[in-house]
Each structure stands twice: as structure tokens, then as C-alpha cells.
Image (tube, rainbow, N blue to C red):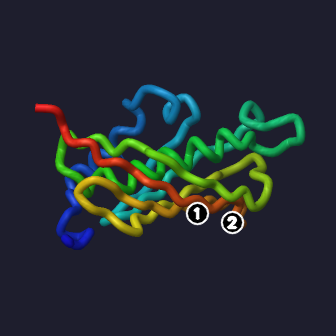
Amino acid sequence: MTSLEERYDAEVARAMLASDAEQPGLPAYLGMKITDNGPGWCHVDLEVTTELLNPFGAAHGAVVASIVDHALGSAVFPLVPLGTWPATLEFKVNYLAPVRPGLLRARSEVRSISSRTAVVAVECTNHDRVVAAALGTIALVPQKT
């Protein structure tokens, strides 16, 4: 098995940090930003605003699930050949505490990677408190030729 450092494409990782403002879709809509990354890990930040709260004043669970999903694939992307699609197969989230308005940060770390799948752990924090823990499996779908 190849180490994460050997698989890591620093140029792809730098491009991910620079391209958040240009990305369409749900991550841009929610305001997610990749703030740091390295060989097999990634940090994603999201500012939780009142628009993202449930009637009880906490972030809706879908907000946490969305940042987890984004962080899962973002940790893997610089490790796979260009053109490979890191597609989420599944993930499980443990919601540990309510997420309040302010910074929500997801820290993802690749635990295992092969030519076909990766397993990634994610920890989410809000106001210096762990609010969610997740584990997911990513399919590594090669580019169609």
C-alpha cells in the first residue's frame, strides 16, 4: 500500500483552497470553505447563521450532515488520480451536542485508502466543543475513458 504522502498531490490541494469561491452547488450555498488540507486530511468551515437553525435554535442536522459529506470527499480528492470521482457511499453521524450560531468546523482524516475505496473519519466542533463525530466510506470511481 502506498503512503498518503506518496499519493498526495499538493497542487490539487492548493487549488482546492483557492477555488471555493468559484464552486457552485450546496457547499457554496451554505458558505462552506476549505480552510486547510494536507496528505489525507482537510478542514472545512461553515458559519452557522440564523437561516440554518431549527425552531429550537440549533443548526438543523442536515447542515452538519452536509459539512461532514463535503469534508469526507475533500480529504480524499488530493490523494486520487485526476479525473477520479470520490463518491460518498455511506456515512454515519453521531450528533453529540447542539450546533449554535457561529463557526462550525469539520476536520476529516483518511483512515484507510485502496484503489477502490477510502474510509474517512470526521470530527465537527462549534465554540471549542465537539458536536458531531462521523465515519464514512468513499468509492473511488475512475475516470471513464
| Image quadrant where residue 131 sits | bottom right
Q: Position of residue 136 (x, y in %)?
A: 49, 55
Q: Amino acid at mark 2?
A: Val
- Say whether residue 107 is left or right of residue 102: left
Residue occupying the point 55% across, 36% down:
31
Packing grade of label 1 (10 A; few <14, some 14-19, many >=20) is many
> Seen from this angle, which residue lies furthest left?
145
The residue that appears at 62% across and 62% down in the rendered structure is 133
- For the N terminus, the quadrant is bottom left
**Residue under circle 1?**
123
Q: Residue at x 39, y 51 (%)?
A: 138
Coordinates of residue 128 in the picture (x, y in percent): 69, 66
Residue 112 on image: x %, y %: 36, 67
Amino acid type, mark 1: Glu
Q: Is residue 64 shown left or right of residue 51?
A: left
Question: In x, y percent, where is residue 119?
Answer: 42, 61
Cβ atoms at labels 2 and 1 below 8 Å apart:
yes
Please say if 144 is above or below 93: above
Q: Secondary structure at mark 2?
A: strand
Q: Mark 2 or 1 closer to N-term?
A: 1
- Which residue is the site of mark 2? 130
Instruction: Decide if residue 99 is on the left or right side of residue 143.
Output: right
Q: Is residue 110 above or below residue 142?
A: below
Q: Which mark identifies residue 95?
A: none
Given residues 123 and 125, the one toward you in this image is 123
Q: Within the image, what quadrant is residue 88 found in?
A: top left
Where disc 1 sits, the SS reads strand
For the residue pair 56 and 96, the one nearer the viewer reads as: 96
89 sits to left or right of 8:
right
